[in-house]
Image (tube, helix red, strand yellow):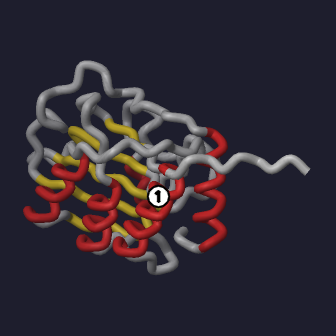
Amino acid sequence: MLNRRSCFLRGLTIATSLLFLPNVWAEDAPAAWPGVKYAKIVGYRFKDPDLQPNGGFLKKADIDMAELKNRTVKTATLSSDQATNLLKAISGTRKHVPRAMCYNPHHLFLFIDENNKVVAAFEFCLECGGERFTSPLDKTKIPDFRAIAKVCEDCGIGLDDDGGTAEAYAKGQDDLEKRLSQPAKPHSKD
């Protein structure tokens, strides 16, 4: 996920598209996400066998738990500290960075109540910076994917199959933001 080719392609896609894709569920958000009571948060890293753009589990109202189980690479129940860090990261106010259009998520956090029912979910793609929520997120909040990557690493679900680290991810994000903040160089006329 974090090799040179994927970083280059991601940067190229972002730089050429210059799309700011808003969270489509960001209307009428509750004050504190997820806005429902839950007993635990379970993190999943899953594989996408189809590798289709706009994939993932939050395309419809219900999450297919059997399919999630079949596609799960790693799972972990978050500790209290990890849950706090995740919620802070989700409700962050990081500077917005243009997103690529790929949306190929491999991570999902399920918020589960005392009856073992999923009451909220947060799915995201570390490659493009896209996310989906089952309940709205305040429009002023932009998830801090560096902090989310750290939660993935800390809880044990990891970032990818290649052993990518949260530190390397953060460095890649910093480099990308730096490149995108520089003025474009004019093309020379030959």
Nearest to the observer: residue 23 or residue 9 = 9
Nearest to the observer: residue 73 or residue 14 = 14
Quadrant (top left, top right, bottom left, bottom right) of the N terminus: bottom right
Q: Is residue 92 above or below residue 22?
A: below
Q: Give coordinates of residue 58: x percent, y percent.
A: 42, 39
Nearest to the observer: residue 8 or residue 164 = 8
**Residue at left offset 14%, top offset 33%:** 35
Instruction: Residue at the far right: name it.
Output: 190
Instruction: Residue at the far front: name it.
Output: 189
Q: Give coordinates of residue 146: x percent, y percent.
A: 33, 61
Task: Specify few, some or many for label 1: CA neighbours under 10 Å numbering under 14, 14-19, or 20 or more.
Answer: few
Q: Give coordinates of residue 83: x percent, y percent.
A: 15, 58
**Residue with the mark numbered 1:** 178
**Is 109 left, or right, of 41 in this rendering?**
right
Secondary structure state at the residue bearing disc 1: helix
Q: Is residue 18 above or below residue 94?
A: above
Instruction: Residue at the far bottom: name it.
Output: 163
**Residue at left offset 65%, top offset 53%:** 12
Q: Is residue 130 above or below residue 46?
A: above
Q: How many marks?
A: 1
**Residue at left offset 16%, top offset 27%:** 30
Name the image quarter holding residue 72.
Answer: bottom left
Instruction: Residue at the far top: name it.
Output: 28
**Residue at left offset 18%, top offset 38%:** 34
Q: Give coordinates of residue 121: x percent, y percent.
A: 29, 43
Task: Specify the amino acid type for callout 1.
Answer: Lys
